[in-house]
């Protein structure tokens, strides 16, 4: 994984939230595996052209959610306990993304509809699935 792959969405209320969501997606999809090291805060900030405090906020939320562990001198790594989505779910998401792309559907529209459907079908959705990640 190269840090350039992580690009905060321009329409996110907070660049830190965009960075958090991208890393979270890479972790739960299994693209970043258990024990794999994330770029340093300084390196990620430089690559993304944001302040180190912005990347630091994203990393803190990832750590709060149990997705990464930060250790002095060892850096920030994907937690051994980080949950990865079942392969069947990842396949269906990839199929949905491919179909949406093939039909010219806007990615943000698909994500917004998924969030609405998820809330209707699962009213007890956790704060991290409903978008409340504690970023101001």
Image (cartoon, grey):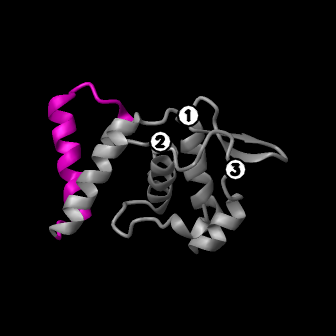
Instruction: Examine the residues drawn in magenta and state their main secondary structure.
Output: helix
Left or right relative to 38: residue 29 = left
- Between 14 and 94, the one lying in front of the other is 94
In the image, the segment drawn in magenta is 104-127
Q: Is residue 50 visible?
A: no
Q: Is residue 74 left or right of residue 11?
A: right
Viewer-nearest residue: 7 or 134: 7
Q: Residue at x 17, y 43 (%)?
A: 116
Q: Which residue is mark 2?
A: 28
Q: Quadrant of the N terminus?
A: bottom right
Q: Earlier in the sequence, mark 2 or mark 3?
A: 2
Q: Secondary structure at mark 1?
A: loop
Q: Which residue is mark 1?
A: 82
**Numbered-mark total:** 3
User: Which of marks 3 and 1 precedes in the sequence?
Assistant: 3
Percent position (x, y) of residue 14? 43, 60
Q: Which mark is residue 37?
A: 3
Question: Could you give the CA–CA distance between mark 1 and mark 3, rounded to whole angstroms?
Answer: 13 Å
Within-10-Å neighbours for mark 2: few <14, some 14–19, many 20+? some
* Residue 101 figure quarter: bottom left
| Tag 1 and tag 2, C-beta contact below 8 Å | yes
Q: Which residue, as the protein is rendered here, is positioned at the far right? A: 73
Of 86 and 4, which appears nearest the observer? 86
């Amino acid at each position: 994984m190269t840090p350039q792959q992580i690009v905060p969405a321009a329409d996110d209320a907070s660049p830190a939230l965009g960075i958090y969501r991208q890393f979270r997606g890479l972790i739960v999809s299994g693209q970043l595996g258990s024990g794999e090291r994330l770029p340093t805060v300084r390196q990620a900030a430089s690559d993304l052209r944001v302040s180190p405090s912005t990347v630091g906020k994203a990393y803190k939320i990832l750590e709060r959610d149990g997705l990464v562990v930060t250790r002095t001198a060892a850096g920030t790594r994907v937690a051994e306990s980080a949950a990865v989505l079942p392969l069947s779910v990842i396949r269906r998401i990839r199929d949905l993304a491919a179909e949406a792309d093939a039909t010219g559907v806007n990615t943000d529209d698909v994500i917004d509809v998924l969030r609405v459907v998820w809330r209707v079908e699962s009213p007890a959705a956790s704060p991290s699935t409903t978008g409340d990640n504690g970023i101001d």
